[in-house]
Image (cartoon, grey):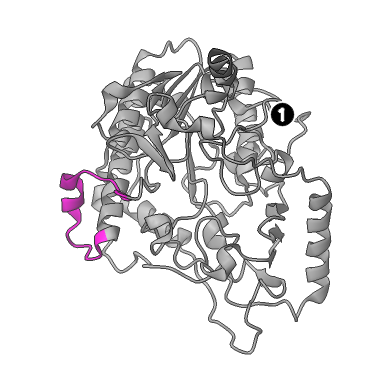
Amino acid sequence: MTGKYPIHTGMQHGVLKGAEPRGLPLHEKLLPEYLRELGYSTHIVGKWHLGFYKKEYTPTYRGFDTHTGFWTGHHDYFDHTAVENPYWGLDMRRGMEPAWDLHGQYSTDIFTKEATGLIDKHNTSRPMFLYLAHAAVHSGNPYNPLPAPDEEVAKFNNIFDYNRRRFAGMLSKLDQSVGQVVEALHKKDMLRDSIIIFSTDNGGPAAGFNLNAASNWPLRGVKNTLWEGGVRGAGLIWSPKLVRPGRVSRQMLQITDWLPTLITAAGGDPSNLTIDGIDLWNALSEDTESPRASVLHNIDDIYGTSAITVGDWKLIQGSTYNGQWDGWYGPSGREWVYDVDNVIGSTAAHAVASVGLGITTEAVRMLRENAMIKCPPRNDSLPVCKPLEEACLFNVYQDPCEDNNLVRQFPTIVRKLQDELKKFSSSALLPGNLPWDSKGDPSLWDHTWNNFGDYINVRVNAAT
């Protein structure tokens, strides 16, 4: 949203909690604000998670015309409450108002209906930016961590692991949502002029991490680690505006790059912005070399972790969770026969075919093969990576699975990457984390997560 690394916004440690009296700093200008200046209507549907301590931190005060969704980092997909022990409250909003009436409706369906409705009602004389941030496939609350309709889960009885079966149900509903949104764009005759980005924000919580059942196989690590399984995200960009579509991109891109890239695609000029993101629109469209040569994954001095990739080389120092989630977690998902016909027959595929960009069996199989991550065997003569004891070095172009620690073979590269980390560290802001404020307890606000900072003085004055 800012085009900046977390170290440059003070958001680099952990995640924002509902009772913290803070949010993404208000002086930061966000993507919807830039796009609004270019004439766009702007809408967010789903997850916000950038603060709501005061109303000024909420979506409709930060560049979005409308918001239907939730403010914290997760919620239950049916009752729409968010548990952050010891607190528990409703987290579903229309703008600033609690949406009690949506209770019992499945979140993925709510967000799909809202998104398609916005498209249907849109005045096409004006461009639109729609940010659809689904809850799926994030964990729900501890009492129902993998919420999915029973009839959806029942479609996957061929998956024997119960949690993976529920995960598949959640993902299937997300898949249907994508199809319905693309179809809505087609029906509104907006598809031929659209840019669609489908992207994760981090690696999956696998093997029971956060009570979830994702898989990052064959990559190492999970969400909230700096291994490739935590930071290498899956993504897709689709548009008739792409000069060279239908391929697997190997260009280096970091999530901060979306802001300047989309500003350029929208007809703006991001060249004078003081941000970390780099404009990749031409590189992505034309399949030319990425202007990005390095990625800072993070520096967290509280956890004692840092990682950076420069070219083919990645240095990682320290480990979250005391190394507990430093392994490789499956399953691979490749043991099943891939249903190409179902892909070609999907709602989204029919919609894109309507603008001359249909897909074939051969194309699907080629893209799937090209997207497969392949890693060399482990060389047992190399030192075992123990990032809590010393830095580890990997050639992540050749070894994206981070199996072969080359820290002893290339000490000069280690020093170079450590120097790069020091440069970034010198520009880092202190983490903005604050102790939880008991006034944020939802039980004080009709059992809803609320912008409690706007009412603290009122309550104090009333008490006086």
The answer to whether 424 appears left or right of 14 in the picture is right
| Residue found 78% across the figure and 28% down from its top | 272
Residue 327, percent from left and from top = 50, 71
The answer to whether 390 appears left or right of 54 in the picture is right
- Figure quadrant of the C terminus: top right
The residue segment tinted magenta is: 143-162
Q: Is residue 188 visible?
A: no
Q: Quick one: 138 or 398, which is closer to the camera?
A: 138
Q: Amino acid at mark 1?
A: Pro
Q: Is residue 433 above or below residue 416?
A: above
Q: Quick one: 269 or 320, which is closer to the camera?
A: 320
For label 1, the residue is 270
| Residue found 20% across the figure and 46% down from its top | 152
Residue 84, percent from left and from top = 44, 43
The answer to whether 423 appears left or right of 35 in the picture is right
Q: Quick one: 299 or 72, which is closer to the camera?
A: 72
Which secondary structure, mark 1?
A: loop
Q: Quick one: 77 or 36, which is closer to the camera?
A: 77
| Residue 318 forms part of the magenta stretch | no
Instruction: Assign the magenta stretch its main secondary structure.
Output: loop
